[in-house]
Amino acid sequence: MKRLVDVAVVGLGIMLSVTAASAADAPAAPAAADKAAPAAETAPAAAPAPDAAPAAGTAGSGQAGSNKQKEGGGPSTVDPKTQPGKSAKEGATWSESRWVLDSGEPTYRISEDGTVDWATYEGFKRYHSECHVCHGPNGLGSTFAPALADSLKTMTYDQFKETVSSGRQAAGGVMPAFAPNPNVMCYVDDLYTYLKARADGALKSGQAWVKKRVAKTKEAQEFEKSCME
């Protein structure tokens, strides 16, 4: 009996020795989560260059193409009544805060250095606020409506006002009547002035806001305020 016990003890000792040896040869267990090795360091992002110039045509101070304005845009100090330049026809005169032809039709005034009268610039802004969704940027048309830069090559001033006010139905679709909309009707003369300059080729696509412009007169501002009330 004693011999059997001794054999069992010896066998148990051998098993323990083998287990210990195996544990010693086994790879170390991964470190606990709170002792994980730190991630490899990454190089810090390069700091932006100081005073980097904005990309052309990007908004800076809230106005599209503000960098272009810094290069020479913005209201000009030219007297609007004596602004040199060309209109739709020779003989245009200054009357009631805008340039007009003998017929009373409003017209643009564009100087050789690119300065535009306030009405042309106002028409540019109003067109792209109210009309370009259908008629395309710069009056170039779209799949929804014709190019007004082409239409005004033959359309008269009176026809333009009537169409804007009462609307028009054509095979391609329907233009709504804007008579109840002061955001359009208060600027109908400015819209015509801008689109006529586009139709005559006197104003290139997108040119109005990057070039100099004459500041809106006090009388024109007062009319705008009273019309919008």
Image (cartoon, grey):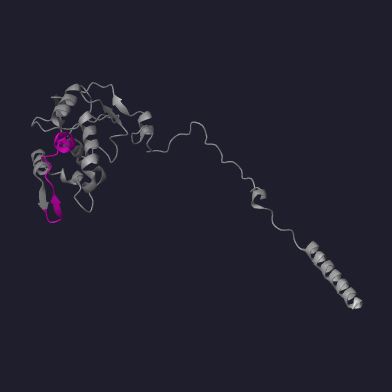
**Height in image: 4 above or below 144?**
below
Residue stretch in magenta: 170-191
Is 129 colored magenta in this rendering? no
228 relative position to 31: left or right: left
User: Looking at the figure, which quarter contains the C terminus?
Assistant: top left
Q: Residue furthest right?
A: 3
**Height in image: 121 above or below 170?**
above
Residue 133 showing in the rendered view: yes
User: Looking at the figure, which quarter contains the N terminus?
Assistant: bottom right
Tell me where residue 212 appears, x and y as whole percent. Answer: 30, 29
- In the depicted view, which residue is nearer to us: 111 or 54? 54
Name the residue rendered at 11%, 38% in the picture: 157
Task: Give residue 30's quadrant in the image.
Answer: bottom right
Task: Give residue 223's quadrant in the image.
Answer: top left
- In the depicted view, which residue is nearer to us: 168 or 73? 168
Tell me where residue 132 appears, x and y as whole percent. Answer: 23, 44
